[in-house]
């Protein structure tokens, strides 16, 4: 079973599996009933997936996992914002929808493997399969996949993980797939450009104003919704101009206070973790740590006794709720969530 | 793993009758002219259109002038509800289990709904309460047969109640699922507006009619050249009308024999599933076991601990075509508003399966279904996840 979103990567993944002689069935998940610009939920994307499947001569089905998506992804997303955190819903979707719900469905229906168009690789280490970065450093998606249960990796396939994006597009163009030059989907699929995050969250959680204070506690600005503020933010804080830029370095939803400071105050020697899981053995020494989907990684140690990431060089603060993923030699060795 | 197709989705669309296909081809071949023109070729086409209108009227028990050809059931339903509201103002009331072609226009215009009983039939007490609580009711719409469960509405009873509590309201029934099972002339006699369609009875998709009793004015949905007596503009589809009329006439002609034969097939299917699956299967609109109020061709069941989407996938891969509730435009299964309004628990409703039969259904279909369905259910419940 290949999960087809209607984008170029999963289209090529399906085509490669066909070429390799697999018996392939395509599935598109319908996750979101509301408005969507792009992602897995828009009808036009389902149409693209179906037409690519038609072109490849494979069956295409649509599974409605809307209830699970709401429960596992959308509701926690809103709740996290209400708690002053900065969640990554794509990771929760991968954890609970693609690589659990859909995988179990595939298994029940008799499929041996589930394939997706993600840019990541599954490598065999001898100690079991491990998730590794995709071949295209600019498109690597192992960060948003780190939550996959290692036990299921042997049942997954990422056919485009060994390719660069340019190669993927070239294959798609060579096959004449309609998705060959389709633009990337970037944003949260259930929030539209037209209505935006504020309107979306405003419908689900109370948005509360907050004071913006400097490091000494003096009030210097205000925000209309503390739930929309994230660490490192510098715009929309109601601050007077003419000074050096100031950045959010603290969010206290209970007291309705946002603390700002100069660029240097964003740097931190360590980041608290609220959860951590090693994929295999604990790694005591240096690891590469990545804290955003397309961010660069930095050298650090993971101290699970104090539950902190100890950076080897000062690192920009990480918003609570963001995923922290550790790599050794491009292989995911652990992951968790940043705390406050 | 796929052999012959076992087609148990007639309530979604039934294969075309060969007579209907022949009628379409004959009319499309013979009539190249626009039936609204004045010359000989147009008059010939016009005659074929009027013959079709007469035939439909005769089969469903109305006057030819009352038949307005439409593109199918959804247009007929929209025409009834929106045409009545546009002509008269006021509000629309319908049952909560109506097809979306009625429900959407009613709700879009701020109308009201009333509930269903656990056996899938309209809750008349609730209808009375809603009628009594509303001012200026323009139209009351209640389907003759529910498209999901097959539950038959007591139309004369509904008409009596509606006339008593909303004397000025028009009565509309979506009879799209009724022509093949019930004597429409009898059951819908008290209704002012009746929607019918071709593709559920072996006619072409894209054909249908709204029957509008003489003297009732609706605002047309489509303005233009004044065709269909000003009620629906656009060049009439002569071949479609001829094929539709043939399907209606043949359906009504064969109905007595077909219904009894299909009812036996349907009952053997339900009973066979009960034998094999025990209390994992529930006949949705027959909580007490009584099936008299369910049309002969529909077996709607709920399967415990099974997800319809996974079940349909397995059935399809074995050549068995069926459906659950309704599919959205992308093809995903959506939760059923019909079952929700009957009070069926959500966890049971997600395991719903509609097996629907028509004139081409056979004992071999039932035998195959009784092999395939229990095996698929067994597989899904063994894995503990649909």
Image (cartoon, coloured by chain):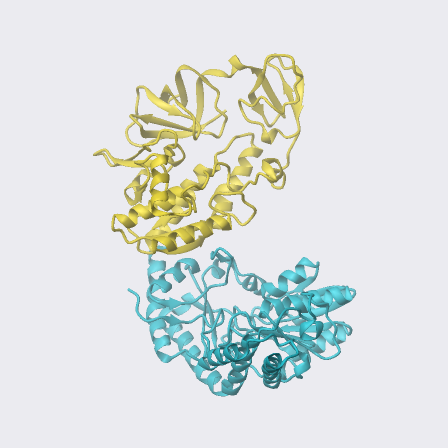
What colour denotes chain B?
Answer: cyan
Residue found farthest to the left: A126
Q: Is residue B180 visible?
A: no
- Image quadrant where residue B241 sits: bottom right
The residue nearer to you, when weighing A52 against B42, is: B42
The x, y position of residue B235, in whole percent, is 62, 71
Residue B152: x and y in percent read 57, 76
Q: In the displayed structure, does residue B335 sit left or right of residue B115?
A: left
Vertical arrangement, residue A206 with respect to residue B215, above or below:
above
Residue A161 in the image: state x and y as whole percent: 32, 37
Q: If the image is split into quadrants, where does the C terminus of chain B sit?
A: bottom left
How many numbered discs, if any? Answer: 0
In which quarter of the view is residue B166 placed? bottom right
Which colour represents chain A? yellow
Choose top left, top right, bottom left or bottom right for residue A166. Answer: top left
Is B268 left, or right, of B71 in this rendering?
A: left
Q: Position of residue A100 (x, y in %)?
A: 38, 45
Q: Name the quadrant of the N terminus of chain B.
A: bottom left
Whether residue A95 is visible, yes or no, is yes
Q: Is residue B20 above or below residue A72?
A: below
- Residue A90's place in the image compared with A219, above or below, is below
Q: Residue furthest front?
A: B39
Residue at screen point 50% across, 45% down:
A71
């Amino acid at each position: 079973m290949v999960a087809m979103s209607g984008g170029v990567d999963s289209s090529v993944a399906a085509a490669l599996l066909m070429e390799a002689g697999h018996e392939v069935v395509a599935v598109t998940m319908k996750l979101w009933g509301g408005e969507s610009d792009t992602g897995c939920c828009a009808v036009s994307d389902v149409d693209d997936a179906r037409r690519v499947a038609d072109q490849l001569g494979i069956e295409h089905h649509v599974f409605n996992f809307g209830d699970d998506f709401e429960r596992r992804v959308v509701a926690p997303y809103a709740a996290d914002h209400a708690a002053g955190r900065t969640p990554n819903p794509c990771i929760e979707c991968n954890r609970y929808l693609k690589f659990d719900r859909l995988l179990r469905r595939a298994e029940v229906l008799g499929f041996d493997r589930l394939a997706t168009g993600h840019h990541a690789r599954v490598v065999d280490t001898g100690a079991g399969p491990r998730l590794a970065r995709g071949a295209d450093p600019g498109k690597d998606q192992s960060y948003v996949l780190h939550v996959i249960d290692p036990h299921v990796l042997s049942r997954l396939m990422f056919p485009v993980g060994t390719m660069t994006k340019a190669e993927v597009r070239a294959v798609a163009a060579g096959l004449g797939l309609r998705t060959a030059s389709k633009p990337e989907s970037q944003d949260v699929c259930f929030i539209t450009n037209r209505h935006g995050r504020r309107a979306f969250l405003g419908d689900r959680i109370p948005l509360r104003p907050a004071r913006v204070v400097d490091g000494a506690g003096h009030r210097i600005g205000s925000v209309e919704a503390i739930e929309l503020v994230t660490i490192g933010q510098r715009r929309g804080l109601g601050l007077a101009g003419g000074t050096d830029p100031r950045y959010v370095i603290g969010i206290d939803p209970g007291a309705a206070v946002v603390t700002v400071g100069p660029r240097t105050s964003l740097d931190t020697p360590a980041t608290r973790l609220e959860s951590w899981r090693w994929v295999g053995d604990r790694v005591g020494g240096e690891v590469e740590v990545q804290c955003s989907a397309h961010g660069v990684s930095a050298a650090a140690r993971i101290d699970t006794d104090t539950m902190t990431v100890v950076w080897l060089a000062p690192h920009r603060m990480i918003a609570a709720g963001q995923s922290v993923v550790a790599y050794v030699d491009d292989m995911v060795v652990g992951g968790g969530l940043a705390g406050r | 793993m796929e052999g012959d197709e076992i087609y148990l989705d007639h309530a979604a669309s039934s294969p075309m009758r060969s007579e209907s296909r022949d009628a379409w081809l004959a009319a499309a071949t013979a009539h190249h002219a626009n039936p609204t023109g004045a010359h000989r070729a147009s008059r010939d086409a016009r005659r074929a259109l009027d013959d079709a209108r007469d035939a439909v009227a005769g089969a469903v028990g109305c006057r030819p002038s009352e038949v307005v050809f439409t593109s199918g059931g959804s247009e007929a339903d929209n025409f009834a509800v929106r045409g009545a509201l546009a002509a008269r103002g006021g509000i629309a009331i319908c049952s909560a289990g109506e097809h979306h072609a009625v429900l959407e226009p009613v709700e879009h215009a701020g109308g009201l709904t009333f509930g269903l009983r656990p056996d899938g039939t309209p809750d008349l007490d609730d209808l009375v309460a809603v009628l009594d609580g509303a001012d200026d009711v323009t139209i009351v719409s209640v389907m003759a047969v529910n498209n999901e469960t097959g539950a038959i509405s007591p139309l004369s009873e509904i008409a009596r109640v509606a006339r008593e509590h909303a004397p000025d309201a028009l009565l509309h029934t979506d009879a799209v699922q009724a022509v093949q099972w019930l004597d429409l002339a009898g059951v819908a006699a008290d209704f002012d507006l009746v929607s019918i369609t071709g593709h559920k009875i072996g006619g072409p998709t894209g054909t249908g009619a709204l029957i509008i009793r003489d003297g009732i004015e609706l605002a047309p949905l489509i303005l233009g050249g004044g065709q269909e007596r000003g009620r629906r503009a656009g060049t009439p589809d002569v071949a479609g009308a001829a094929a539709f009329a043939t399907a209606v006439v043949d359906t009504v002609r064969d109905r007595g024999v077909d219904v009894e034969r299909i009812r036996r097939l349907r009952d053997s299917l339900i009973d066979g599933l009960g034998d094999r699956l025990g209390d994992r299967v529930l006949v949705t609109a027959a909580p007490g076991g009584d099936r008299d109020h369910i049309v002969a061709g529909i077996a709607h069941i709920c399967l415990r601990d099974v997800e319809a989407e996974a079940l349909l996938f397995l059935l399809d891969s074995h050549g068995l075509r069926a459906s659950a509730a309704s599919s959205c435009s992308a093809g995903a299964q959506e939760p059923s508003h019909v079952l929700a309004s009957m009070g069926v628990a959500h966890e049971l409703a997600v395991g719903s399966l509609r097996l629907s039969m028509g004139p081409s259904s056979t004992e071999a279909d039932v035998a195959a279904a009784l092999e395939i369905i229990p095996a698929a259910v067994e597989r899904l419940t063994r894995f503990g996840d649909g």
